[in-house]
Image (spheres, rainbow, N blue to C red):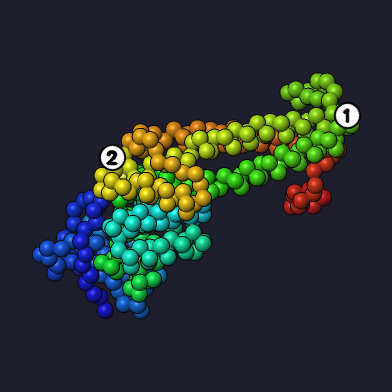
Amino acid sequence: MIMPLLHRPAFNSIGQDRVGSPLFAAFRHCPCLFETSFIMSSSASSRIEKDLLGVLEVPANAYYGIQTLRAVNNFHLSGVPLSHYPKLVVALAMVKQAAADANHQLGHLNDKKHAAISEACARLIRGDFHDQFVVDMIQGGAGTSTNMNANEVIANIALETMGFEKGEYKHLHPNNDVNMAQSTNDAYPTAIRLGLLLGHDALLASLSSLIQSFAAKGEEFNHVLKMGRTQLQDAVPMTLGQEFRAFATTLTEDLNRLRSLAPELLTEVNLGGTAIGTGINADPGYQKLAVDRLALISGQPLVPAADLIEATSDMGAFVLFSGMLKRTAVKLSKICNDLRLLSSGPRTGINEINLPARQPGSSIMPGKV
């Protein structure tokens, strides 16, 4: 059985209704705009959702909706879905939770919707439903598809919490409720910043552990004399300990920079700026409330950007942070190549060190490790 469902248009939808669709021909004189207009029976394998471009069949068990499905169909670029980055998914859920809390406190989101959205966000933060983030990580549209993937998943989890079927958006809508007072242009970069911060401690801990290991080997090998080389040619003597201590020192420089850069670059967020930084469609009190809630929810020292228009248009912080990560990656690659060369052989290579055996290195030469 197919049932018509009506609700008002989303505030931030754009485009025209394609009334020529045969499925909706009977409703083209209806004064209401259908966003998700039909829900299939529970025994069906799909439900029909409608947006301003037309209709699509969405898998009945999917928590994402029509806009996510369009993005999946449009962007076959990397093959890596958003779910591959759990910290980003968690950060998106935290942003949506903070926004819902602020809108609820300001009286724009009722108790029932707020409770349902909060439960949905909490489940995403715990790690549930991450497989529903199916949009390719590389996409057009400045992150709109990512934002809508989050909005639709949260909305449908919330709808089930309220006792409704997935897609019954007249009761709770991805745009009007989950995305209330937000734009992709403030919610998405805020989530990226937060996702990087959530994973930053693990990066620092791993790098610190590696530095400590190199430093310990520097002490252990302090008495081992070896040849220093330039361009793979013998140069002057040195100790193996000096070489390993140099590895520790160069990575310590990057560790210190990464520790200082993250608070400087990533804690100022433009949440509340909405589309271009003017805060259109948001309550004047929304920005401070939302950012304060996000800082509390995430445990990160987030602060509102001083100039929302500048913060919305300038992504220089990501460029600088990416450059620092690239510098560290280049150093790690160089160290790995040095270790590989020093362990080459064992008969005709340099063979100055022995790396622990991990697995056979050839199918035709079983003795090669």
Per the model, the C-alpha gap separating discs 2 and 1 is 65 Å
Q: Amino acid at mark 2?
A: Thr
Of 363 and 163, nearer the camera is 163
Q: Is residue 108 left or right of residue 217?
A: left
User: Considering only vertical position in the picture, is 314 above or below 190?
Assistant: above
Q: Residues within 10 Å of mark 1 (few under 14, many from 20)?
A: few
Mark 2 residue element: loop
Q: Residue at x 59, y 33 (%)?
A: 257
Q: Residue tagged by mark 2?
A: 278
| Tag shown at residue 225 | 1
Q: Quadrant of residue 216?
A: top right
Q: Is residue 50 left or right of residue 251?
A: left
Q: Amino acid at mark 1?
A: Leu
Mark 1 residue element: strand
| Tag shown at residue 82 | none
User: Considering only vertical position in the picture, is 314 above or below 45?
Assistant: above
Q: Residue at x 63, y 36 (%)?
A: 255
Of 245 and 348, nearer the camera is 245
Q: Residue at x 47, y 41 (%)?
A: 267
**Residue 271: % across, % down:** 37, 45
**Residue 210: % across, % down:** 71, 42
First-in-chain label (2 vs 1): 1
